[in-house]
Image (cartoon, helix red, strand yellow):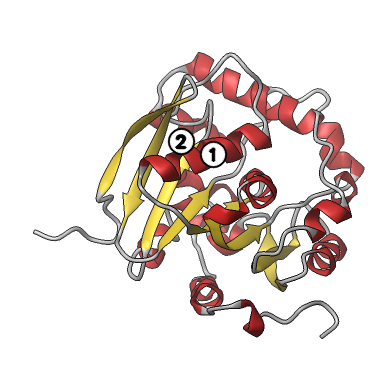
Amino acid sequence: MTNKASDPVDSGYVLLDGMKMYYEVYGSGNPLVLIHGGGSTIDTTFSNIIPLLAENRQVIAMELQAHGRSGDRDAPLSFAQSANDVVALMTHLGIDKADVLGFSNGGQVLIEMGLRHAERIRKMILASTFYKRNAAPDSFWNYFEDATLDTMPAILKDSFLKVNGDPQGLQNMFDKDVRQMQNFTGWTDEQLQSIGLPVLIMNATMDVSSMEHAMEMHRNLPHSELVILPGRHGEFLGTLESLPEGRWTQKYVIGLLEQFLGVDGLSQICPPGA
């Protein structure tokens, strides 16, 4: 009996720098690594797109430090450490280079990967992410000043407890995510300009970050393309917390991803101003 694209062909844990990281692998072919958003699991961020993407390629997803089934370490969350963890997982799985999609905080992990481990990435997809604090309104940052667990979307809490079952672990994840955002300083234009990889930037019209900031990212990433999509934060990817009435209506996004990932070489990526 063959595996369906919706069934993992491999899953398990790998010990990384004192932490057990949970991962799943789907499909076969050219590898695509998926990095979820803050407070999420593989299922909440990617359950809608994994079966479609895995029809044509190998898809690797993991749960970051303190999230879902993964363990924790006696250290705060950082995008730099998470970038190192994702690369260590790739090494464990024998993947020298992969396309990588990062959603929200996962996109910030991917920016660190692009700065620290560019040789391990073929193409980058930054989905609903930002690199400067001024990308988001003051109300977004004010939320983290006195955030409590009861303000977290119920579907994210339920999904964590479904795969982990530890209420203290849920509180720990929430607290660490909040502190990571309270301490967010972002990156400079010059740092982004140093990333020479092909990048697809995806932003929604009602996203956390503004469309103007998405354009600013596009101008500072020298080999980037930009797509603005209708909806809210994560809606175009079908993240479970974003879907009105649980229905994902933007499956055409898979075609956009496949078109970008299928392009070989930088010559077909138009630089800003071309």
The amino acid type of the residue labelled 2 equals Ser
Q: Is residue 39 visible?
A: no
Per the image, the residue denoted by label 2 is 159
- Residue 83 position within the rendered picture, expressed as x and y whole percent measured from the top left: 59, 40
Q: Are marks 2 and 1 in contact (CB under 8 Å)?
A: yes
Q: Is residue 117 left or right of residue 128?
A: left
Q: Quadrant of the C terminus?
A: bottom right
Q: Residue at x 69, y 70 (%)?
A: 230
User: 183 above or below 168?
Assistant: below
Q: Quadrant of the N terminus?
A: bottom left
- Residue 60 position within the rendered picture, expressed as x and y whole percent measured from the top left: 40, 51
Q: Secondary structure at mark 1?
A: loop
Q: Residue at x 40, y 22 (%)?
A: 165
User: 30 above or below 255?
Assistant: above
- Residue 173 position within the rendered picture, expressed as x and y whole percent measured from the top left: 58, 24
- The residue sitting at the left extreme is 1
Q: Quadrant of residue 222?
A: bottom right
Q: Residue at x 46, y 35 (%)?
A: 159
Give the number of callouts: 2
Per the image, the residue denoted by label 1 is 40
The amino acid type of the residue labelled 1 equals Ser
Q: Earlier in the sequence, mark 2 or mark 1?
A: 1
